[in-house]
Image (cartoon, rainbow, N blue to C red):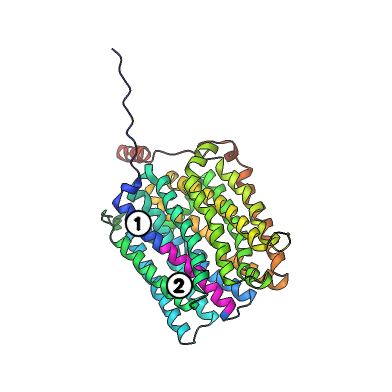
Amino acid sequence: MTTSEPTPTRRRSLTHHADFRRLWTGDALGQLGAELTGFAIPVFAVQTLHASEWEMGVLGAAEFAAFLAIGLPAGAWVDRMRKRHVLIVTDLVRAGVLAAVVVAALLGAASVPLLVAAALVIGVCRLFFDVAHQSYVPGLVGLEHVVEGNSKLQSTASIAQATGPALGGVALRVITAPVLLAVTVVTYVLSATWVWRIRKPEPKPDPATRRGLWVEVREGLEFVLRERFLRRIVACTSISNFAGNIGFAVFTIYVLRTLGLTEAVLGLIVSAGAVGGILGALVAEPVTRFVGEGRIIPVTALLFAPAYAALPLAGMLAAPPAVVLVAGMAVSTFIIVVYNIAQVSFRQRVCPPPLLGRMNASVRFIVWGVVPLGSLLGGWLGTQLGVVPTLWVAVGGSVLAALSVVLSPLVGMRDLPTPDHAAAEAVTEDETSAQ
């Protein structure tokens, strides 16, 4: 008698997962608000408040200062809280801070120091939101759905990157930056509302399992530094972020002053470039399967620097600068999104669930903590060397970033290891019982 193999059950898409749809909708609104904010504030600083290169570097540094100052303990704090509550509170705080900026601007009391203070608070919220967000997805949808979930959330982020600056650039032709910031207040409130509607219970972490704060922080950091592939990936991401933000510190000045383009064109450049991110999110899963989930990381890291070089080349080539910038931004964003989906999914799979918050916070501390340093250096280099040489320094840094993963076993690997955390925990419990 012949026994037929059972037909494998087809995995159901997360579009049928009601709570994921609520998270997805809230995330989309929050991402749109973040993109509008990220576009409106630098334009307001350059065009209305006449910020210098150094002031723009300080403003960029303020946005990410929290990752350097409290990035490590944030993960331990998030692991002690319900992550959905963290998402809701951080959305509402960002809405309140931006509302205060809007009021100050309408009263004629806005200044660069005020924007820096607002960026500091918004940066703290972003830190806690990002750590909670990445730690919340696996528990909400299950580990077997994390790649699909991350791809869908990344596609939303890319769509926001594409539409947000374009909408902002067009809107600033008919309304003022403070009015545009008022719109972002509404998007953050709506984002919090949708996340609040998630129905799946999230148990509060047991206080009895807590140890000293720095003991827990050390566990997350040691896991990142001990895991050999994760260590190389984090090094690549960190150096790349440092180099990229050297250039981004002067990017708005470069487009508006050096190249003489308008705010609307700036919005079009950023939005058109982000279309590459949408494509990257849509094809990340099949591209990763084709290239290999290990090999895709060094391949994308190696390709980023040539794409980023389009920024300083835009003013030197015969083609219109806007066209060169659109092409370069599209390709670089495509590469970044594919890289990020691959490495974030690997991080979520390789880390034991109780350690996710601390692991993500440790990674954020390393890869985002360098951003304010890069922004400050970019502002200083812009003042000392000029805007275009500063952009070339950023390109050189991107080349160095790729070396940690290109010169590694990842180049020859199709599959990355996925540990069996449940089995490991069972073994640990058996050993504990036997003692």
Mark 2: give few (<14), some (14-19) or many (20+) Cα within 10 Å.
many
Identify the residue position indicated by label 1 in the image: 23
Query: Is 433 drawn above or below residue 103 in the view shown?
Result: above
Instruction: Name the residue type under label 2.
Output: Val
| Residue 2 in view in this figure | yes
Q: Which label lies toward us, 2 or 1?
A: 1
Q: Earlier in the sequence, mark 2 or mark 1?
A: 1
| Residue 215 in view in this figure | no
Segment tinted magenta in the rendering: 30-47
Q: Left or right of 47: which side holds 138?
A: left
Tell me which secondary structure the magenta stretch mostly adopts.
Answer: helix
Q: Left or right of 402: which side holds 279?
A: left
Identify the residue position indicated by label 2 in the image: 121
Q: Residue at x 36, y 60 (%)?
A: 26
Instruction: Name the residue type under label 1.
Output: Leu
Mark 1: give few (<14), some (14-19) or many (20+) Cα within 10 Å.
many
Q: CA distance from mark 2 to mark 1?
A: 23 Å
Question: What percent of the width, then of the height, locates residue 171?
Answer: 49, 72
User: What is the secondary structure assignment of the residue under circle 1?
Assistant: helix
Q: Left or right of 354: which side holds 267?
A: right
44 in the magenta segment: yes
285 in the magenta segment: no
Question: What percent of the width, then of the height, locates residue 249?
Answer: 61, 68
Residue 121 placement: quadrant: bottom left
Say which of 262 and 405 sits in front: 262
Residue 144 placement: quadrant: top left
Say which of 323 and 240 sits in front: 323
Residue 156: assigned label: none
Question: What percent of the width, then of the height, locates residue 398?
Answer: 64, 55
Question: What percent of the width, then of the height, locates residue 78?
Answer: 38, 60
